[in-house]
Image: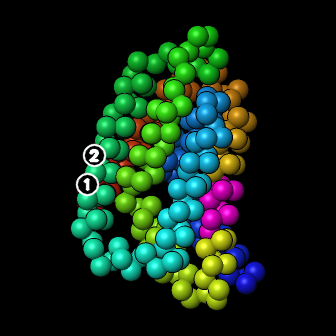
């Protein structure tokens, strides 16, 4: 049982570690210190739902209805293109710095909506959590322990990223650093969108 849980944690962590739209958003919220707990909880709980669905056998359902993956692929690519363009626009406008007085805070509802969209409109999340983790979990006994390990890795990663981002805050008192981050986020979004379209 412990071996299955460790395997689930290791695989889940390795899949989520790659820089992606969701991770970039969580990092940004952590740097700004805005709604960090609700955002990381939303990400981790969303992953938990998908992992449990995969372990419970939902991966088979997705494989039987590939049209759902196609819809998510094109919708996700479109959303990422728009989000990337917004990041490039923010970089072009510049002027944002962590210590800026009177900076308008993003409303909680808007932050959670963006977080949910970046999570659920990304077809890779279904392939990683539902299909891949769900399929591999069948090789372990009990599969539930494997799934629990994967869920734990998601909570560990998002809480570390969101709350650990504050260690980088001194760097982001510079408006130039924010511009660089916005450009990197934009490039990441467009790269993922291109990968989705060309897949």
Instruction: Give the CA distance from mark 2 to mark 1.
Output: 6 Å
Q: Looking at the image, which is closer to me, 40 or 7?
A: 40
Residue 160 seen in the figure: yes
Describe residue 144's horizontal placement relative to residue 91 as left or right: right
Q: Looking at the image, which is closer to me, 132 or 108?
A: 108
Describe residue 14's horizontal placement relative to residue 112 as left or right: right
**What is the x, y in percent for residue 130?**
46, 70
Quarter of the picture containing the N terminus is: bottom right
Quadrant housing residue 177: top right
Residue drawn 63% across and 37% down?
Answer: 36
Q: Residues within 10 Å of mark 2 (few under 14, many from 20)?
A: some
Q: Is residue 151 magenta?
A: yes
Magenta span = 150-157
Against 158, is 170 above or below?
above
**What is the x, y in percent for residue 95?**
50, 15
Find residue 78 and name its label: 2
Q: Is residue 189 magenta?
A: no
Residue drawn 42% across and 54% down?
Answer: 120
Q: Which residue is mark 1?
A: 74
**What is the x, y in percent for residue 151?**
62, 65
Find residue 197 and name its label: none
Residue drawn 37% across and 30% down?
Answer: 86
| Magenta region, main secondary structure | helix
């Amino acid at each position: 049982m412990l071996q299955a849980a460790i395997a689930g944690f290791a695989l889940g962590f390795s899949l989520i570690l790659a820089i992606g739209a969701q991770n970039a958003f969580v990092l940004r919220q952590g740097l700004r210190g805005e709604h960090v707990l609700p955002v990381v909880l939303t990400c981790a709980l969303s992953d938990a739902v998908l992992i449990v669905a995969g372990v419970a056998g939902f991966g088979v359902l997705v494989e039987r209805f590939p049209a759902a993956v196609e819809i998510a692929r094109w919708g996700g690519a479109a959303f990422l293109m728009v989000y990337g363009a917004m990041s490039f626009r923010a970089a072009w406008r510049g002027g944002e710095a962590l210590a800026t007085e009177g900076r308008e805070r993003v409303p909680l509802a808007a932050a959670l909506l963006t977080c949910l969209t970046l999570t659920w409109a990304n077809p890779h999340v279904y392939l990683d959590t539902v299909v891949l983790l769900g399929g591999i979990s069948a090789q372990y006994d009990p599969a539930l322990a494997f799934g629990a390990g994967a869920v734990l890795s998601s909570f560990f990663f998002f809480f570390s990223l969101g709350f650990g981002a504050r260690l980088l805050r001194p760097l982001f008192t510079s408006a130039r650093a924010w511009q660089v981050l916005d450009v990197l986020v934009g490039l990441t979004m467009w790269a993922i969108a291109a990968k989705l379209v060309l897949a």
